[in-house]
Image (tube, coloured by chain):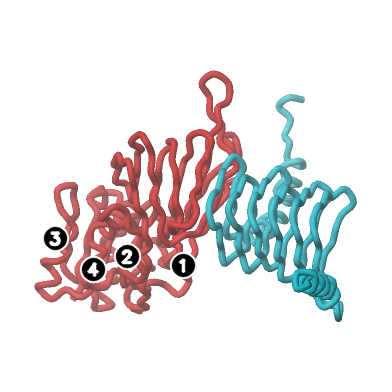
């Protein structure tokens, strides 16, 4: 049995036609199922657990990167298969998973090509796409073997599924990309050095693949994991191998 | 003149970027670990992939593949790598499985053990170099020491 979790933004009128055509395609394939709409007050884990008790085997997330991160960061431990129907803008994870945006995603879903995905674990919660730490004075210890520090503040991004696009300077037109590899998390560190009275300048970044790392600081720093923002003093990040069973496309990038 | 279309120039730029893009993509794929400038790494720094060092590393560095120490980088550690290209400063012993290349800006204070060594004019090196391939090199280096020890023991015996 299939369960479809629709993001709240899909209520907008401009998505009506695509939602209709997706539903028609799913009915054609015989994989249509119960539709649940997400909003800020619904805990995805709770509703997925309830539906699993009622016999649900596959949970399909319908929306964009934010929806994907929101659901899987809470429900990664649920015992079911996950699918993804990317609709609308801001869909970069779907490209990594080899799922086309729009109605064509139903074809991938019907083929049921399943892969186990690694998930990042951070202070008792999961993150799927990426984790972003805003510039702060940080000390990073990798795999309990070596530590990394910078002279001043440091910005950090940990990529799991989502590639990270960055620019050397704000005026730069060319974008640089950090491609996440399978089996490891990618930590992207960018130190800042003081320039002039108030300004800061970004230095060339460092990239470290890792499985476990601990970030500490004397003062609280802001952490954004899958869109959820929190203030922390100590963060432990680990890689949880093969936590999520996901239906993926043939053109996936791992 | 100010508002003149600059189409020919743009097309050249586009062509250039098109040519550069695959090479950059390949390089990004190859490179796994990068230690950027103004970053200090302390401890046993090990990686299974290629390493590029632009900052400071102290402790030990180990990779089974390619190590590149850029100009301005400082390593105060013993280094083990598959192949290496050094343009920065290294204080410590280098044990390289295959080839080591010292560029003109390289400064090395330590012993080098490698199969193939290439040194550009201008590179500074203070240490012992040992390369496998010369028969009897080990026995030659050990013989005098043994004989000296033997002499000392006989003197002590007397």
The reply to whether dot 2 and dot 4 touch (C-beta < 8 Å) is no
Q: Which residue is mark 2?
A: A84
Q: Nearer the viewer, mark 1 or mark 2?
A: 1
Chain A shade: red
Quadrant of the rendered structure where residue A170 is?
A: top right
Q: Is residue B131 visible?
A: no
**Disc 2: host chain:** A
Crowd band around label 2 with a 10 angstrom C-alpha radius: few (<14), some (14–19), many (20+)? many
Task: Please determine if labels 1 and 4 lie on a single subunit.
Answer: yes
Labels 4 and 3 in the same subunit: yes
Which quadrant of the view contains residue A233?
A: top left
Q: Which residue is mark 4?
A: A59
Observer-side mark, 3 or 2, equals 3
Q: Please tell me which residue is depicted at 35% across the width and 52% down the height of the picture.
A: A236
Mark 1 sits on what residue?
A182
**Outermost residue to the right:** B121
Q: Position of residue A222 (x, y in %)?
A: 35, 39
Disc 1 or disc 4, which is closer to the eye? 1
Q: Position of residue A154 (x, y in %)?
A: 48, 39
Give residue A46's mark.
3
**Chain painted cyan:** B
Judged from the image, the secondary structure of the residue bearing numbered disc 2 is strand
Q: Nearer the viewer, residue B40 or A133?
A: B40
Of the two numbered discs 3 and 2 on the same chain, state the one appearing first in sequence: 3
Task: Give the mark nearer the N terminus: 1 vs 2.
Answer: 2
* Mark toward the start of the polypeptide (4 vs 3): 3
**Circle 3 SS class:** helix
The residues tagged by marks 2 and 4 sit, at their Cα atoms, a distance apart of 8 Å
């Amino acid at each position: 049995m299939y369960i479809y979790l629709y993001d709240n933004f899909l209520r907008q009128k401009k998505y009506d036609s695509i939602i209709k055509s997706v539903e028609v395609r799913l009915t054609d394939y015989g994989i249509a199922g119960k539709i649940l709409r997400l909003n800020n007050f619904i805990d995805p884990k709770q509703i997925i657990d309830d539906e699993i008790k009622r016999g649900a085997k596959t949970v399909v997330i319908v929306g964009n990167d934010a929806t994907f991160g929101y659901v899987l960061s809470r429900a990664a431990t649920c015992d079911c298969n996950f699918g993804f129907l990317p609709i609308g803008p801001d869909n970069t994870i779907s490209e990594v998973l080899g799922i086309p945006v729009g109605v064509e995603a139903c074809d991938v879903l019907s083929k049921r090509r399943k892969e186990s995905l690694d998930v990042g674990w951070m202070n008792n919660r999961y993150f799927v796409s990426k984790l972003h730490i805003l510039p702060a004075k940080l000390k990073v210890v990798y795999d309990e073997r070596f530590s990394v520090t910078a002279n001043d503040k440091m910005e950090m991004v940990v990529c799991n599924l989502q590639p990270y696009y960055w620019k050397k300077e704000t005026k730069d037109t060319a974008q640089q990309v950090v491609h996440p590899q399978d089996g490891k998390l990618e930590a992207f560190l960018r130190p800042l050095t003081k320039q002039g009275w108030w300004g800061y300048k970004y230095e060339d970044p460092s990239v470290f693949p890792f499985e476990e790392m601990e970030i500490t600081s004397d003062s609280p720093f802001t952490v954004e994991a899958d869109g959820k923002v929190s203030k922390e003093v100590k963060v432990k990040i680990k890689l949880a191998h093969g936590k999520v069973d996901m239906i993926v496309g043939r053109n996936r990038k791992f | 003149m100010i508002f003149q279309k600059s189409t020919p120039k743009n097309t050249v730029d586009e062509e250039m970027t098109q040519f550069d893009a695959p090479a950059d993509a390949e390089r990004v794929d190859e490179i796994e670990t990068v230690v950027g400038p103004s970053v200090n790494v302390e401890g046993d720094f090990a990686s299974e992939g290629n390493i590029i060092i632009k900052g400071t590393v102290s402790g030990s560095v180990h990779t089974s593949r390619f190590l590149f120490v850029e100009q301005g980088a400082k390593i105060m550690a013993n280094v083990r790598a598959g192949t290496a290209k050094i343009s920065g400063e290294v204080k410590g012993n280098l044990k390289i499985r295959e080839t080591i290349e010292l560029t003109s800006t390289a400064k090395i204070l330590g012993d080098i053990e490698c199969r193939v060594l290439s040194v550009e004019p201008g590179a500074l090196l203070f240490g012992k170099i040992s390369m496998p391939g010369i028969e009897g090199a080990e026995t030659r280096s050990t013989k005098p020491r043994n004989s000296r020890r033997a002499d000392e023991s006989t003197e002590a015996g007397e």
